[in-house]
Image (cartoon, helix red, strand yellow):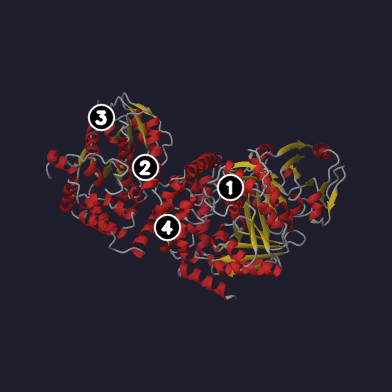
């Protein structure tokens, strides 16, 4: 479905619009406060942007260093060209461990490759432990709609009802958010303490040391990373950072941009295997999954700098109105509009680069300064060149207008036609406009006619 | 070398072209050592950590046992890392406690490696002082001792003082979630109660 | 000072009043204004719609037409941002009107008088591509008799976005309806801004809703001596 058609559906859901509007308005104001108290926020953004660009330019070296360091620390590194390879690796580890259940920390990379479905097909149930992921998983009809809070489209009352009907087994939960959190705690506690294998994503992988980092809030991450005997981490190849020191930049940029806190409740950093502490078997899967396609586009590759904070979603006026599901991707919002078509191929989502008014609010808040509007424009150009016929009505109108604007004589002739409600200018703009808005009264004379009358043709 | 690895690295090299531009990294933000480490830093830490709904206590080192006893009261099953400082109350040392035994603890008392004033963060480094990771995770109440001398001003100060040798957990307040209407609600899977005792 | 007016094809064809107001205003402030009749379109719509190739001739043309002027002034923040970014040879000397008044002419009080209740919508491109900041508001505050009321959610996009308003008409309208609600909440008679494109969008809804609120380009208010 095109973004336009999907948005038409979600725009009609008044509850969804209210829920998203309320949540994003709150987080926008909080983010402004969290950022305002950091005097060196702009230098941190500059450093974040440069570290990411530096990483991409030296990616082969960084990945090989990461592999060597993780291996030296007792971990096992796997490489996966695509999602199917990554899923097969995870399934084979689970089978060797002999478990039909794994616990999961929220990971967009695993969602991207539909790992849960792939494992299910192998008879292995993947249990989501992040509260929002759990909310989505408990309702088979539901889908993620936000990078950070996949259930942002659900309000407290809806979540309460869902929990009462599922994990709380008919017990009434009351109206406090804490009761909802308590229900999730009770539901998952025993799983954390008994399931032998966990799957996580990664926020960072430090090439220099082999250290992996997971940033979270609830403690479900710590549970998954600490309690099971076996840990498998899936990491997109773009998540590598060259140096230990780089953590000081991203541990400041990410929490304030993401949940608008000075720091998120828990961040776990581990390097390989630690005897007597945590999983005694650690696997790191490095996933391409289309990332090298993104890297091949010199302008578009900056989309790989994304640290998944979701600040761009929270400020986007389009996202706020249509919600995440209209983007039909694990990555919604402005970053999704540039990442999805590049990861999956332009032809898979050709309407997404147009899902923006180019207002620039996303660029303004991006902690690593991804110029999303410019990349959107660049991708529009690529879609037009690579995916569309040169004979679409739009292409013909654009050509017609470029021709009309190419000389003064033709331009003035086109203006005369426009006054009569005809010609290329009108053809391009009129349909779709007057359905919902009035057009201004056409002026009696153009500016240049007035000028010529007043000042001559000079 | 696996074929997947060779393929991916070849694709990366192909995507980058023969001579990708490698930008310099400007580190003009406040680096480690930029900010003064004085008593005000400890005050700031107490303030920022309390804003996460952790309970902050400030005592002289000699008063530590009394304070910990006052926080925990009597009759609780209290875990500590093996060989932990004497708290003058009955404790269960973690010499390889099973998951079930950890789950039976009412509370745990540990030290910490350092703390960050700017963000109200406690840094646990797996080992004798902070304990292993499961010890500070499974019990529902964590009493964490922070030496005033270990409080650093900023995140870069902390990162500079840390290394990859042991697992690290950065703790900023009790377990919480922002998943319900993007508002922070305390108390999910990690310890729901966090007492921070700053001493010295 | 001798300046060239870059009217933009949009204003030339649909909103000549904005251009006339710029001429009136700049002449009142002692500038000699020229209008190069060879100018057509800067190519922004083409580039932003994915037709960069079609725009390159327009970029060359723009550079030729304005090559010999010391300063070029435009009543469009959006087109100014485009030429500044894309047309290297002349982009640096093209100024959006409020930038020109404050930074180049050094005036804040332009001698205008406009005794009406007015609210100002800062357009996205003036805010985030040109960083004009509070320049338009500083100019408006000096207008005699004006009752300037703050617009709630001012920094949020009105939903125009060029072809976005047509390609994603439903989303655009959802954004517009919030903007219009905020405009109506101010009880202003006039909604003004530095881009007539956004104003055409907002004004189209204000007119369809028979609200009686007018839209005016900021130049028209700054030129007014009612």
Residue C224 is labelled as 3
Residue at image coords 25%, 45%: C10
Give x and y (percent) for residue C5. Answer: 23, 43
Can residue C100 be seen?
no
Q: Badge 2 sits on which subunit?
A: C
Give x and y (percent) for residue B126. Answer: 74, 54
The picture quadrant where one finds residue A112 is bottom right
- The residue that disc 4 covers is A1
Q: Residues within 10 Å of mark 2 (few under 14, many from 20)?
A: many
For residue B61, above or below residue A269: above
Residue C126 is labelled as 2
Quadrant (top left, top right, bottom left, bottom right) of the N terminus of chain A: bottom left
- How far apart are the two marked residues, 3 and 2, measured between alpha carbons? 22 Å
Q: Is residue A448 left or right of residue C168?
A: left
Q: Secondary structure at mark 1?
A: helix
Q: Is residue A301 left or right of residue A188?
A: left
- How far apart are the two marked residues, 1 and 3, measured between alpha carbons? 49 Å
Give x and y (percent) for residue A370. Answer: 47, 53
Q: Are marks 3 and 4 on the same chain?
A: no
Q: Mark 4 and mark 1 in contact? Answer it, CB < 8 Å.
A: no
- How far apart are the two marked residues, 2 and 1, measured between alpha carbons? 30 Å
Q: Badge 1 sits on which subunit?
A: A
Residue at image coords 34%, 47%: C165
Q: Nearer the viewer, residue A361 or C64?
A: A361
Q: Mark 1 and mark 3 in contact? Answer it, CB < 8 Å.
A: no
Q: Nearer the viewer, residue A8 or B53?
A: A8
Q: Badge 3 sits on which subunit?
A: C
- The residue that disc 1 covers is A255
- How far apart are the two marked residues, 3 and 4, measured between alpha carbons? 50 Å
Q: Mark 2 and mark 1 in contact? Answer it, CB < 8 Å.
A: no
Q: Badge 4 sits on which subunit?
A: A
């Amino acid at each position: 479905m095109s973004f336009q058609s999907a948005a038409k559906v979600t725009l009609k859901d008044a509850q969804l619009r209210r829920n998203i509007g309320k949540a994003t308005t709150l987080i926008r104001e909080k983010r402004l406060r969290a950022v305002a108290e950091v005097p060196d926020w702009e230098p941190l953004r500059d450093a974040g942007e440069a570290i990411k660009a530096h990483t991409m330019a030296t990616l082969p070296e960084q990945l090989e260093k990461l592999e060597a360091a993780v291996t030296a620390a007792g971990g096992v590194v796997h490489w996966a060209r695509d999602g199917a390879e990554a899923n097969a690796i995870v399934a084979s580890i689970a089978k060797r461990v002999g478990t039909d259940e794994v616990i999961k920390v929220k990971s967009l990379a695993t969602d991207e490759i539909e790992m849960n479905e792939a494992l299910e097909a192998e008879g292995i149930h993947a249990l989501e432990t992040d509260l929002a992921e759990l909310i989505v998983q408990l309702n088979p009809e539901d889908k993620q709609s936000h990078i950070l809070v996949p259930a942002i489209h659900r309000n407290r009352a809806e979540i309460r009802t869902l929990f009462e009907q599922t994990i709380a087994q008919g017990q009434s939960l009351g109206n406090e958010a804490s009761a909802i959190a308590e229900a999730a705690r009770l539901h998952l506690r025993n799983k954390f303490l008994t399931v032998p294998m966990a799957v996580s994503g990664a926020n960072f992988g430090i090439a220099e040391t082999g250290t992996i980092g997971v940033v979270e809030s609830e403690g479900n991450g710590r549970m998954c990373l600490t309690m099971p005997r076996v840990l498998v981490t899936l990491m997109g190849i773009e998540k590598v950072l060259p140096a230990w020191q780089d953590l000081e930049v991203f541990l400041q940029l990410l929490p304030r941009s993401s949940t608008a806190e000075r720091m998120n409740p828990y961040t776990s950093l581990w390097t390989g295997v630690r005897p007597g502490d945590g999983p005694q078997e650690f696997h790191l899967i490095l996933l391409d999954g289309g990332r090298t396609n993104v890297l091949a586009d010199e302008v578009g590759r900056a989309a790989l700098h994304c640290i998944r904070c979701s600040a761009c979603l929270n400020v986007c006026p389009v996202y706020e109105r249509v919600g995440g599901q209209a983007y039909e991707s694990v990555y919604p919002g402005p970053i999704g509009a540039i990442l999805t078509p590049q990861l999956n191929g332009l032809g898979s989502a050709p309407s997404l680069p147009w899902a923006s008014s180019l207002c620039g609010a996303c660029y303004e808040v991006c902690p690593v300064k991804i110029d999303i509007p410019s990349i959107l424009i660049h991708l529009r150009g690529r879609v037009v060149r690579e995916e569309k016929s040169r004979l679409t009505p739009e292409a013909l109108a654009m050509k017609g207008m470029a021709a009309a604007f190419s000389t003064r004589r033709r331009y003035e002739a086109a203006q005369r036609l426009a006054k009569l409600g005809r010609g290329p200018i009108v053809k391009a703009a009129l349909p779709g406009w007057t359905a919902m808005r009035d057009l201004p009264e056409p002026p009696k004379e153009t500016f240049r006619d007035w000028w010529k009358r007043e000042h001559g043709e000079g | 070398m696996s074929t997947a690895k060779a393929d991916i690295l070849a694709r990366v090299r192909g995507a980058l072209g023969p001579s990708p531009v490698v930008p310099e990294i400007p580190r003009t933000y406040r680096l480690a050592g930029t900010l003064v480490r004085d008593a005000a830093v400890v005050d700031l830490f107490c303030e920022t950590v309390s804003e996460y709904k952790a309970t902050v206590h400030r005592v002289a080192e000699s008063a530590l046992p009394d304070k910990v006893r006052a926080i925990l009261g009597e009759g609780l099953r209290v875990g500590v890392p093996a060989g932990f400082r004497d708290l003058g109350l009955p404790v269960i040392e973690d010499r390889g406690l099973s998951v079930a035994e950890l789950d039976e603890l009412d509370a745990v008392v540990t030290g910490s490696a350092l703390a960050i004033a700017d963000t109200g963060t406690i840094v646990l480094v797996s080992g004798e002082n902070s304990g292993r990771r499961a010890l500070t995770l499974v019990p529902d109440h964590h009493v964490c001792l922070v030496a005033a001398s270990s409080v650093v001003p900023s995140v870069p100060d902390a990162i500079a003082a840390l290394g990859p040798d042991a697992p690290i957990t950065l703790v900023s307040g009790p377990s919480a979630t922002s998943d319900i209407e993007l508002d922070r609600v305390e108390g999910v899977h990690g310890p729901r109660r966090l007492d921070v005792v700053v001493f010295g | 000072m001798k300046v060239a007016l870059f009217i933009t094809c949009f204003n030339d064809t649909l909103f000549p009043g904005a251009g006339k107001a710029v001429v009136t205003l700049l002449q009142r402030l002692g500038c000699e204004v020229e209008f190069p009749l060879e100018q057509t379109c800067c190519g922004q719509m083409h580039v932003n719609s994915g037709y960069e190739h079609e725009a390159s001739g327009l970029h060359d043309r723009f550079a030729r037409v304005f090559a010999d002027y010391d300063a070029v002034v435009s009543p469009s923040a959006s087109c100014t941002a485009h030429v500044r970014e894309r047309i290297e040879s002349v982009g640096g000397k093209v100024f959006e009107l409020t930038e020109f008044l404050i930074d180049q002419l050094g005036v804040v009080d332009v001698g205008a008088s406009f005794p009406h209740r007015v609210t100002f919508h800062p357009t996205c491109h003036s805010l985030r591509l040109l960083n004009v900041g509070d320049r338009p508001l500083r100019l408006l505050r000096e207008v005699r008799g004006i009752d300037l009321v703050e617009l709630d959610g001012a920094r949020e996009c009105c939903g125009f976005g060029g072809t976005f308003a047509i390609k994603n008409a439903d989303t655009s309208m959802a954004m517009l309806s919030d903007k219009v609600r905020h405009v109506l909440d101010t009880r202003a008679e006039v909604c003004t801004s530095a881009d007539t494109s956004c104003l055409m969008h907002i004004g189209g809804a204000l007119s369809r809703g028979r609200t009686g609120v007018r839209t005016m380009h900021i130049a028209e208010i700054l030129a007014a001596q009612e």
